[in-house]
Image (spheres, rainbow, N blue to C red):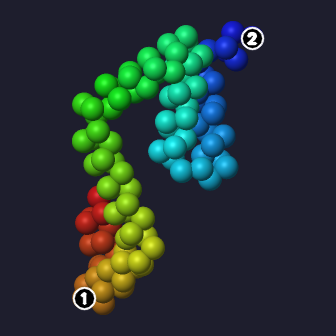
Amino acid sequence: MSMLTNPVFVSVLVMCVLCLLKVNVLFSILASALVAGLMSGMGFDGTIMTLIENMGGQSETALSYILLGILAIGIYESGLASILAVKIEKVFGKTGKFFALILAV
């Protein structure tokens, strides 16, 4: 029963449920952080202040991951990877697939 009262477990569970319900990921993270802070006894003000203070140093890294994800989705949605694979195969013939594999690695 102690697992259900663990703030970390409950916050991860809240985040997973919100993501499965297709709620925005950033909102899910903020909501789960708020749940964890309130369950741990920090209070609303303490939770918000801790969240703001600790996001300051990591915001650059988080932004890099977000932009990398956006780039990956853009490449996937545009079909650019398929187009490049076809072009490489035309240029290099049957060895094009091997060349594309080398580039991917």
Q: Is residue 92 left or right of residue 46?
A: left
Q: CA distance from mark 2 to mark 1?
A: 63 Å
The mark total stands at 2
- Residue type, numbered disc 1: Val
Which is more toward the observer, 7 or 37? Answer: 37
Taking the spot 32% from the left edge, 26% from the top edge, the residue there is 54
Residue located at (27% from left, 32% from top): 56
Q: Which residue is mark 1?
A: 91
Answer with left or right where residue 79 lies relative to residue 53: right
- Residue 26 is situated, as x and y percent measured from the top left of the image, at 47, 45
Residue 13 image position (x, y, % from top left): 64, 31
Q: Which sits in the foreground, 74 or 49? A: 49
Q: Are marks 2 and 1 in contact (CB under 8 Å)?
A: no
Q: Is residue 53 left or right of residue 13?
A: left
Instruction: Return the mark for residue 1.
Output: 2
Measuring from the top left, give residue 77's x and y in whole percent: 45, 73
Q: Is residue 66 left or right of residue 25?
A: left
Q: Secondary structure at mark 2?
A: loop
